[in-house]
Amino acid sequence: MGHFKSSNISPEERQIARKQQLKDYCLHHTFKQPLGAADVHALAVDDKQKFIYCVIPKVSTSTWKKVLARPRGITPLIKRWDMWRHFSNYTEEERSQRLQNYFKFVFVREPLQRLLSAYKDKFIRHAEYSKDIRKVIVQALRPQEFEPRGENFVSFSEFIQYFSENVTRDKHWGQYEQLCHPCAINYDFIGHLETLEEDAALMLKMAGIDNRATFPPIHNVTGSSEVLEYYSQVPPQYITRLGELYRTDFDMFGYDYLGPIKQLLNQK
């Protein structure tokens, strides 16, 4: 199963393929419906531009916030939830009305790359963010080294080991299904980080704001060689377990299951 990255397919054709992929998945799997307010915290609503955006962290969300602030003349520094409203803050009737009438979109990326990106960002670059969960992980995996006031460094292998269990997940590494409920919400547009440049242009056009907003040039993102480097440090049984927990992320959006790290499992 590929993820529709071929250069000989147009962005419009890619959308058709992605929607069909998701529709086929949803036809053969059960999913939560109806959704309650507690289920839709990741959905951002812009009542001025009439769109609903499922915000999946580590999929260019900071850039999207800046791009989508521009047509409204909002400073890019404004906090996300000052600029948009949580979908969960509306009544059931208001939510239903917006789902029927607003443009709904989501952007995803290869699941294992997203997990690595989240680890690097929240456990290394901005380690203050993860201080509480690092304490939990160290206490769970090597309690003899736990320091109540210490840094409690967690390696990538330990991060994967801990989250290969069915435990509560932060939004930065939560599954797409739990964040965006793509079987219950009929998204008008499904973007992939891997084809972001073309997808962004088409999404802005379909949303009717391409004359007021443009997506900036794209910088390097976590690549497959880096993914191999990090995941090669992880014992294969944890990768296998993790893969099962995130299988829906691969299957719903047409990503090759376990992607580039399948070769690690064959080697060991």
Image (spheres, rainbow, N blue to C red):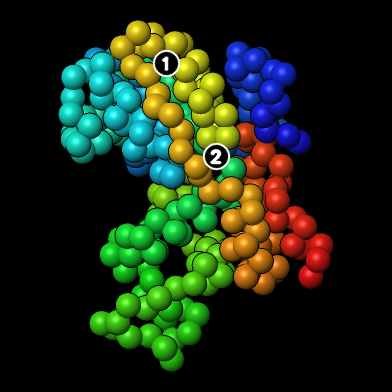
Q: Around disc 1, counting alpha carbons within 10 Å, would you say few (fewer than 14), some (14 to 19), or many (20 or more)?
A: some
Mark toward the start of the polypeptide (1 vs 2):
2
- Quarter assignment of residue 232: bottom right
Quadrant for residue 22, please give it.
top right
Task: Identify which residue, 130 or 193, lies in the foreground.
Answer: 193
* x then y, percent, for residue 48: 24, 15
Q: Which structural element holds mark 2?
A: loop
Kindly identify the amino acid type of the residue bearing the numbered disc 1. Leu
Q: Please state the horizontal and vertical placement of residue 257, each as a whole percent of the image.
A: 71, 46
- The residue type indicated by label 2 comes to Arg
Marks 1,2: beta carbons within 8 A: no
Q: Is residue 62 left or right of residue 115?
A: left
Task: Determine the residue positioned at 48% across, 52% down.
Answer: 117
| Residue 170 occupies quadrant | bottom left
Q: Residue at x 72, y 19 (%)?
A: 8
Q: Residue at x 71, y 26 (%)?
A: 6
Camera sees residue 215: yes
Q: Secondary structure at mark 1?
A: helix
* Residue carrying label 1: 204
Identify residue for label 2. Answer: 109
Q: Which mark is residue 55?
A: none
State the quadrant of the C terminus: bottom right
Q: Is residue 207 left or right of residue 224?
A: left
| Mark-to-mark CA distance, 1 and 2 | 19 Å
Horizontal arrangement in the rendering, residue 25 relative to residue 64 (left or right): right
Q: Residue at x 35, y 8 (%)?
A: 211
The quadrant of the picture occupied by the N terminus is top right
- Residue 241 in view: no
